[in-house]
Amino acid sequence: MAQPYLHEHVTCVAAPATWLSDHSGQLRGGADGLYVDDRRVLSRLIVTVEGAEPVPVQVRRTSAASARFTAVLPGLGDDGPDPTVTLERRREAGRAAAPRPSS
């Protein structure tokens, strides 16, 4: 198997954990996943809302160990052409993954 290209992946690292995903935050297989001690422990995680995947609009690296993924949910919320419902996911690697109050 050829070495996968990772330059377009969002990577969150805090030893011994590493998260790899595309800009949507979805884990679709391939190189995507959660790795702990160099072993992949999660390879697929697809979030859907009412059967549809959220549409990614932004990814922001908040540290070497964390990222924030923002998406919209077309068809939910107010009538009109522009989406009014958003989904925000935060990802943290390592011990930083313990729940913390939102700021």
Image (cartoon, rainbow, N blue to C red):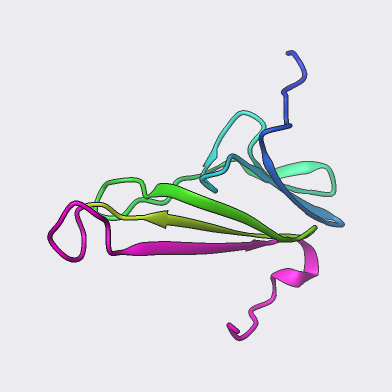
Residue sitting farthest toward the left: 79
Residue 95, given in percent of the width and then of the height, sits at: 79, 70
Q: What stretch is highlighted in magenta?
A: 75-103
In this rendering, position of residue 67 left or right of residue 72: right
In the picture shown, does residue 67 fall above or below 100?
A: above
Magenta segment's dominant SS is loop
Q: Which of 42 and 64 is in front in this view?
A: 64
Q: The C terminus appears in which quarter of the rendering?
A: bottom right
Question: For the point 42% across and 51% down, which residue is it?
Answer: 47
Q: Which of 59 and 36 is in front in this view?
A: 59
In the picture shown, does residue 13 fall above or below 101?
A: above
Residue 55, given in percent of the width and then of the height, sits at: 38, 46
Question: For the point 85% across and 49% down, which residue is it?
Answer: 37
Query: Is residue 94 highlighted in magenta?
Result: yes
In this rendering, position of residue 102 left or right of residue 61: left
In this rendering, position of residue 73 left or right of residue 30: left
Residue sitting farthest toward the front: 81
